[in-house]
Image (spheres, helix red, strand yellow):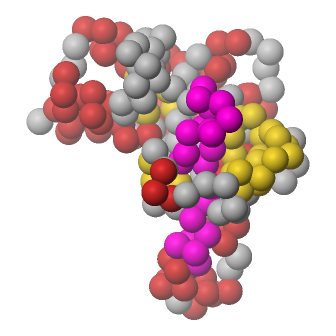
Amino acid sequence: MTEPLFDSKTLDLHVDNAIGMGNRRWVFQHPDNPKLCIKVARQAHIRDQLNAKGGLYRHMPTTWRDDNVLEARAYRQKALTTTDPYVWQHLPHMHGWQATNLGPGLVFDYYTDAQGQPAANLETVLQTQGATPALEVAVENLHAYILKTEIWMRHPGPPNIVWAADGHLKLIDCLGTYTMGWQHRFAGLRQKRLKRHCAYLDTAIARALT
């Protein structure tokens, strides 16, 4: 862990209070700051997944599939070293590591809607509101952001994007990727991948609306 500690305090978290749970992480609203959240890897679950694959996977460390480790690495990419505030318009700040009783957690910005409730993910928005003009503008702005900032990420899917109170779509769980290697260093490969991201998102949106 080369990222700074957010706080030297050890948090006492309980999975029953998680505000979200993905394949490999729990997400909690930070108990000391409601504008932040903390993501904690489900280490036992990751171990079970690797063991179930058998073979060499049984001997691999859980860090190989730990989305916190992968995301922290992704936040060190060159595209995020700029001082231009635009780079954070659709991406939460990562504030550092914090110890918890469930294991090390990563602290990020936490988004709410205009009523102060947890921001709904894009999948839920599409199912409840459909493709409103405001949402279409928000998607167009996200496309432009992805192509301009050239941030290396996973395909951005509707479950991993939220619509925040500022009107912008936020990429809350898209950066951790296994391919943060040599490919992102070449402009041609980078642009090809970014265009695929936009196409993937459009396809996922169309599917959610059918």
Q: Which quarter of the figure has residue 162? A: top left
196 left or right of 34? left
Q: Where 68 sits versus 142, above or below?
A: below
Quick one: which residue is furthest to the bottom in this view?
A: 55
Q: Is residue 101 visible?
A: yes
Residue at 74 percent across and 28 percent down: it is: 80
| Of residues 137 and 22, the one drawn nearer to the viewer in this rendering | 22
Residue at horizontal 64 percent and vertical 20 percent from the top: 88
Which residue appears at 19% of the width and 32% of the height?
A: 127
170 versus 55 height, above or below = above
Query: Residue at left 77%, top 52%?
Result: 10
At which x and y percent is residue 168? 46, 16
38 relative to 194 in the view: left or right: right
**Which range is magenta?**
27-47
Image coordinates for residue 86, horizontal then vertical, percent: 65, 13
The picture places residue 98, in percent across and down from the top left corner, at: 76, 48
Whether 46 is among the magenta residues is yes
Nearer to us in this view, 40 or 154: 40
Q: Quadrant of residue 163?
A: top left
User: Residue 1: horizontal and vertical position, in percent?
Assistant: 84, 54
- Magenta span contains residue 150: no
Let me know if residue 201 appears in the view.
Answer: no
In screen coordinates, is 115 left or right of 95? Answer: left
